Image: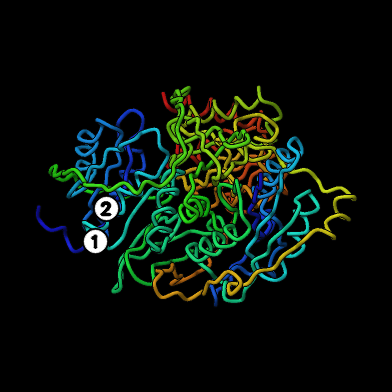
């Protein structure tokens, strides 16, 4: 069984995140870069299965600028066996279509039984990549799973949607995405960190994958305008002197909010 | 059949287990009507098509294409096949789909198959000389961004509860869409358990008022106070990630970067410090009220009305004051 886990480097949501107002791209210097936590949970799921099932190969895959090596190493330190880093200047500002086509080409090249991703990233919050990959790889998708069981030839789980919860299953190969309901990631230990240095880390360019960034046949999404919203100003702040509940009730009623 | 309007906006809506259209449908037609003529593609479970088509017309669809899924236990793929056929037939200027889990899967698979451009998680649409433009609120509302497609109709997923506009009802005009199955492999839906509405409270997503609680509530039992204030105001209940992690309330109620984003008229934060992670999910609310015992809590930086005090004293007093004035 070969499991590929997608991880993404994102600006830490616990700090201020900035977009460059000239280019519209994420300002990577403005905030600390971390592996998106949902990707760590996806990796944890794969590693838990690998711990219990000998002969399972877990590979992490990321598409990121050059500086992302540290976050990829973290995936290896957690226990993934190998890593692939797609890195190409021409992918700067890539839209979802180009991103999905590039990832799919890499996944095809790596070979897979199961692809596991987070349901939605904290930066783009698109949540499209899993289904796009399934379409491009010609396999079933089971997205937004809040619990997952992996067996030899199949994967199943609970899929909460607005009106209830579906129980879904798919034969492998397949693409699944998981929600935050899955367990959090293990911490890499010293042994893992040392071992990570010896694990294979492959870097791929678009040319390696036989792709170009400016295929005229594909429609791409482009950003037209970008503007920063003025920060919200603080309003009234009172210290409770025994009547704050009353005062707050007045405020809500005056503003027709009660 | 007559031609489709040149300014067609294809709105894709699916039926729920009850047979009714998904809740986001009204907003999708409202958004579409502002930039063109809404044409509906109704993805219905078998037998639910004609009722759902009538509902789509009431919500503003000038024409309705009905595709009843040939295999309701196959996840997702038949909807993509239907969308391919509907786009071919109607040649729309844009395709609007809800940014729900199923909507995202549909949009993603369709765009990958047809190499169409996607604009995700839009909070509005407009039209310029070149075509339909999607408006986004990104990084938790810190930036406003617009996007569109280099060519062809953009596939736009619309954030649930973000569109207030509603379209005018249209006379019913529906037809069955001819769909050629792609035969692509799909996951199976083996069982479905419908969510029982355990509460008469409004849903968090799209709620006009939200009362949210954080770690300051202290325990699952004491978290009930959040619900009491919510019920007094007719508000939905939300929570910070800290409260969810502490087990006070299920993760479905989490507001924040990871969780639900709300843009309610009123947002009351009880015992929530206001980490950026949380603010990213609520700072676009119109009026923000915060009650916290720590006067340095960052939530006060964005609160229109902040109370430094013990929420276990302030909130019960607020509830009784509001109850007294209702009489």
How crowded pointer 1 is (Cα within 10 Å; few <14, some 14-19, many 20+) is rated as some
Q: Nearer the viewer, mark 1 or mark 2?
A: 2
Relative height, residue A154 to residue A14 (above, below): above
Q: Quadrant of the C terminus of chain B?
A: top left
Quarter-of-image position of residue B23: top left
Residue located 9% across and 52% down the image:
B1
Q: Residue at x 86, y 54 (%)?
A: A195
Q: Which mark is residue A109?
A: none
Query: Can residue A207 be seen here?
Result: yes
Is residue A37 toward the left or the right of residue B5 in the image?
Answer: right
Nearer to me, B134 or A52: A52
Q: Secondary structure at mark 1?
A: loop
What is the distance, in whole Å, between disc 1 and disc 2 at their CAs?
A: 10 Å
Where is residue A91? Give x, y as percent.
57, 72
Residue receiving disc 1: B91
In the picture provided, is A151 more to the left or to the right than A250? right
> Badge 2: how crowded within 10 Å, few (<14), some, or many (20+)?
some
Residue A244 visible somewhere in the drawing: no
For mark 2, what is the residue? B85
Q: Chain of mark 2?
A: B
Sequence-first tag of 1 and 2? 2
Tell me residue B44's x, y (percent): 29, 37
Nearer-the-camera pick, A146 or B213: A146
- Answer with left or right where residue B78 lies relative to residue B325: left
Secondary structure category for the residue under label 2: helix
Q: Position of residue A108 (x, y in %)?
A: 57, 58
């Amino acid at each position: 069984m070969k499991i590929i886990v997608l991880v993404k480097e994102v600006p830490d949501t616990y700090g201020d995140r900035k977009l460059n107002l000239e280019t519209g791209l994420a300002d990577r210097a403005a905030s600390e870069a971390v592996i998106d936590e949902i990707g760590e949970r996806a990796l944890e799921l794969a590693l838990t299965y690998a711990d219990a099932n000998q002969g399972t190969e877990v590979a992490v895959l990321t598409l990121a600028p050059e500086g992302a090596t540290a976050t990829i190493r973290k995936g290896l330190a957690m226990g993934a066996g190998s890593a692939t880093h797609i890195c190409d200047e021409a992918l700067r500002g890539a839209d979802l279509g180009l991103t999905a086509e590039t990832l799919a080409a890499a996944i095809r090249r790596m070979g897979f039984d199961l692809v596991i991703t987070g349901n939605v990233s904290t930066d783009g919050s698109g949540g499209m990549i899993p289904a796009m990959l399934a379409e491009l790889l010609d396999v079933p998708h089971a997205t937004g799973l809040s619990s997952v069981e992996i067996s030899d030839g199949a994967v199943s789980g609970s899929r909460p949607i607005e009106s209830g919860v579906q129980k879904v299953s798919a034969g492998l190969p397949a693409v699944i995405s998981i929600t935050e309901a899955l367990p959090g990631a293990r911490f890499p230990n010293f042994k893992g960190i040392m071992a990570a240095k010896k694990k294979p880390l492959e870097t791929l360019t678009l040319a390696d994958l036989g792709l170009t960034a400016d295929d005229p046949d594909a429609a791409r999404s482009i950003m037209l305008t970008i503007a920063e919203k003025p920060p919200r100003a603080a309003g009234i702040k009172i210290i409770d002197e025994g009547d704050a509940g009353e005062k707050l009730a007045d405020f809500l009623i005056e503003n027709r909010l009660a | 059949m007559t031609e489709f309007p040149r300014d067609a906006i294809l709105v894709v809506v699916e039926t729920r287990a009850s047979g009714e259209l998904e809740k986001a449908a009204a907003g999708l037609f409202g958004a579409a009507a502002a930039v063109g003529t809404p044409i509906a593609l109704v993805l219905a479970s078998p037998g639910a098509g004609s009722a759902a088509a009538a509902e789509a017309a009431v919500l503003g669809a000038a024409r309705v294409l009905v595709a009843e899924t040939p295999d309701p236990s196959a996840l997702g793929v038949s909807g993509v096949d239907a969308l391919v056929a509907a786009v071919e037939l109607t040649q729309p200027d844009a395709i609007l789909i809800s940014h729900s889990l199923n909507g995202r899967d549909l949009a993603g698979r369709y765009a990958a198959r047809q190499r169409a451009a996607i604009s995700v998680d839009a909070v509005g649409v407009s039209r310029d000389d070149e075509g339909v433009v999607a408006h986004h609120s990104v990084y938790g509302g810190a930036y406003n961004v617009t996007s569109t497609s280099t060519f062809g109709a953009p596939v736009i997923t619309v954030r649930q509860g973000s569109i207030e506009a509603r379209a005018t009802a249209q006379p019913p005009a529906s037809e069955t869409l001819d769909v050629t199955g792609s035969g692509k492999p799909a996951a199976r839906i083996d069982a479905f358990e419908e969510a029982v509405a355990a509460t008469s409270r409004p849903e968090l997503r799209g709620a006009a008022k939200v009362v949210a609680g954080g770690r300051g509530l202290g325990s699952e039992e004491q978290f009930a106070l959040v619900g009491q204030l919510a019920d007094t105001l007719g508000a939905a209940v939300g929570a910070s990630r800290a409260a969810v992690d502490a087990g006070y309330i299920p993760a479905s109620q989490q507001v924040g970067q990871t969780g639900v984003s709300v843009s309610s008229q009123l947002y009351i934060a009880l015992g929530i410090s206001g980490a950026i992670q949380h603010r990213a999910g609520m700072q676009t609310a119109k009026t923000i009220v915060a009650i916290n015992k720590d006067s340095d809590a960052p939530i006060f930086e964005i609160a229109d009305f902040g109370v430094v005090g013990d929420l276990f004293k302030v909130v019960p007093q607020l509830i009784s004051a509001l109850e007294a004035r209702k009489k």
